[in-house]
Image: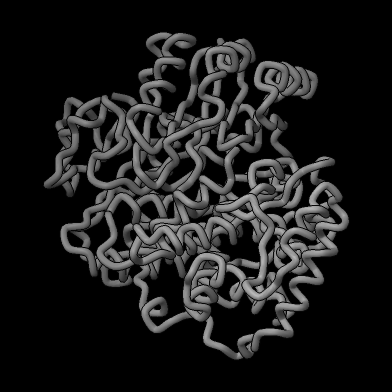
């Protein structure tokens, strides 16, 4: 995992307005390494691990480095090294910190961030300059292997002050790691005395940076590519979802799925969008990984970033599944899915939806709006279609966005688990989708912009044999027009209009609102014909 390369690709374009400026990009690259080293310290990370950090929270940098002198030193050193104005350097860092934090958390997945960063120390350690030893906890450096060289991003020579003649002395000390750090500390203190540090109250961003648009910030929201599959009772491919950044990765994953599951791979719904990464660390091992999961009935697997999370109804089977997958993909972190934390799942989904909506910017792509809305968990009560109060704030924001974006038309789709009859689940899922539409209309959305459909239990995204899988299958999904609807339903929709078939079980779309069903096909929600 090349953490610095990932942050340079995802965060830097959102921070550096003139994206081709190499000095600013190199400055940020070096800051990412220092920032990652700081977050690898558990005591530092735990101070704000439970906070909902906004992506535009420029004050977050101040909470990571609480000592004002350290913040001043970081911005000053980086500015001098890369030829960037000191005030501008401070602004770049303050903007990059919360964005980099979210990207690192996303890469870490379910692994605690300090552990993830410690495990991947080699991917960023060589970018850390010697002077950074004075602004980092000892724990961020002690994990370095013996003889490791803490160097500058651009040059391997030790940093020197222009008026300091001690370069040869410093070179003589290089073989001794401890004396390097000691010499860097003395050098940093000397420099602090020779220069007038900027006051703590110096503005953290230039006027130009303060006006950076939300649309630019949204560039940073790149999610790891992911594959979610579940097997059925007879080891068939029961559910499959794929989220990737380009068609090349989609083709590679689909070829692997087809090689193991045959034509069943065609049921896999793919979301190809530049909001997702174009690489999947496990893609090269899919030919080995997929047969293992295929041989376990009623199992589920989520591959996201460097993590594989699996579940199965039987604990002994699950333990073996984890062991087999870890042996097949030793570079991945394989773990069993933990017990369902219902309230935690709801809270996390709402927080994630809030962040996604913050990153939409002006004139958002309708697909991004649909994706942001689909993140939230709308946890309807059993057999009910009443929207919980906690979801209304997200839907209120969505109503304003939908009204402001011309020609935005969304499909609201209800899904259930399999714990009732097909006909009952179909009806309940449609009622819940209609409930969401009615609420958005009550908040001022033009009803013609919203269509609904109930899919019942027919499009699972997880297994229905575990509590966690059933929870994920009970969901409300937002799509743009006919995007993502199964092949059997695609003919029922077009870009102009869609008739939410009142009797979806009769395999046609002859219903007209109000119900005008062909008498030979039964009436609305009548599964008998």
Task: Between residue 220 and residue 370, name the one nearer to us.
Answer: 220
Which residue in the rendered view is the most extreme toward the left?
A: 496
Q: Position of residue 457 (x, y in %)?
A: 45, 32
| Residue shown at 48% from the left, 26% from the top | 239
When the figure is inspected, residue 361 is found, relative to residue 108, above or below; the finding is: below
The image quadrant of residue 360 is: bottom left
Asked which quadrant contains residue 285, the reply is top right
Is residue 389 visible in the rendered structure shown here? no
The residue positioned 63% from the left and 50% from the top of the image is 156
In depth, the one of 469 and 190 nearer the eye is: 190
**Front residue (pair 464, 368):** 368
Quarter of the image with the N terminus is top right
Q: Is residue 55 visible?
A: yes
- List x then y, in percent, for residue 134: 77, 68
Would residue 529 be found to the left or right of residue 217 on screen? left
Of 62 and 513, nearer the camera is 62
Q: In the image, 362: left or right of 112?
A: left
- Left or right placement of residue 220 versus residue 66 in this view: left
Quarter occupied by residue 242: top left
- In the picture shown, does residue 438 fall above or below 273? below
Q: Is 351 on the left or on the right of 17, as rendered?
A: right
Number of numbered discs: 0
Q: Which percent across, then down, holds residue 63?
A: 68, 74
Q: Residue at x 43, y 66 (%)?
A: 358
State the quadrant of the C terminus: top left
**Does 23 sit above or below residue 340?**
below
Q: Name the spot of residue 29 as percent of width and height, x first.
A: 54, 56
Q: Residue at x 69, y 41 (%)?
A: 122
């Amino acid at each position: 995992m090349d953490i610095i390369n990932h942050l340079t690709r995802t965060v830097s374009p959102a921070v550096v307005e003139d994206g081709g400026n190499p000095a600013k990009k190199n400055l940020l690259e070096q800051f990412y390494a220092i920032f990652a080293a700081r977050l690898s310290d558990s005591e530092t990370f735990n101070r704000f691990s439970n906070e909902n950090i906004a992506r535009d929270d420029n004050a977050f940098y101040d909470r990571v480095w609480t000592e004002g002198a350290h913040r001043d030193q970081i911005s000053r050193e980086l500015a001098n090294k890369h030829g960037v104005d000191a005030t501008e350097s401070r602004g770049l860092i303050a903007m990059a910190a919360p964005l980099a934090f979210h990207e690192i958390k996303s890469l870490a997945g379910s692994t605690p961030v300090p552990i993830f960063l410690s495990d991947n120390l080699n991917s960023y350690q060589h970018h850390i300059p010697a002077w950074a030893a004075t602004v980092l906890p000892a724990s961020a450096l002690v994990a370095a292997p013996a003889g490791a060289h803490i160097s500058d991003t651009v040059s391997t020579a030790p940093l020197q002050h222009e008026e300091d003649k001690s370069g040869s002395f410093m070179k003589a000390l290089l073989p001794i790691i401890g004396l390097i750090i000691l010499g860097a500390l003395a050098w940093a203190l000397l420099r602090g005395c020779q220069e007038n540090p900027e006051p703590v109250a110096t503005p953290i961003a230039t006027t130009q940076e303060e006006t950076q648009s939300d649309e630019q910030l949204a560039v940073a929201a790149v999610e790891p590519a992911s594959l979610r599959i579940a097997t059925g009772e007879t080891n068939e491919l029961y559910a499959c979802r794929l989220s990737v950044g380009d068609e090349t990765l989609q083709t590679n994953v689909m070829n692997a799925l087809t090689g193991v599951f045959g034509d069943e791979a065609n049921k896999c719904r793919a979301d190809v969008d530049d909001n997702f990464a174009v690489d999947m660390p496990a893609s090269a091992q899919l030919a080995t990984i997929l047969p293992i999961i295929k041989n376990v009935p009623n199992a589920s697997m989520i591959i996201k970033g460097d993590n594989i999370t699996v579940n199965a109804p039987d604990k002994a089977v699950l333990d073996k599944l984890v062991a087999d997958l870890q042996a097949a993909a030793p570079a991945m972190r394989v773990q069993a899915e933990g017990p369902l934390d219902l309230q935690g799942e709801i809270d996390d989904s709402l927080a994630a939806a809030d962040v996604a909506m913050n990153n939409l910017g002006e004139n958002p792509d309708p697909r991004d709006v649909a994706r942001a809305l689909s993140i939230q968990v709308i946890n309807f009560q059993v057999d009910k279609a009443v929207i919980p109060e906690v979801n209304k704030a997200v839907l209120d924001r969505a109503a304003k966005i939908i009204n402001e974006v011309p020609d935005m038309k969304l499909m609201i789709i209800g899904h259930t688990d399999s714990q009732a009859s097909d006909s009952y689940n179909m009806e309940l899922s449609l009622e819940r989708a209609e409930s969401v539409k009615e609420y958005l209309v009550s908040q001022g959305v033009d009803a013609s912009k919203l269509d609904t459909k109930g899919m019942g239990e027919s499009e699972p995204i997880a297994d229905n044999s575990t509590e966690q899988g059933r929870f994920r299958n009970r969901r409300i999904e937002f799509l743009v027009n006919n995007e993502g609807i199964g092949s059997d339903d695609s003919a029922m929709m077009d870009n102009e209009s869609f008739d939410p078939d009142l009797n979806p079980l009769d395999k046609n779309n002859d219903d007209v609102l109000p119900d005008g069903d062909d008498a030979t096909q039964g009436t609305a929600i009548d599964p008998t014909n």
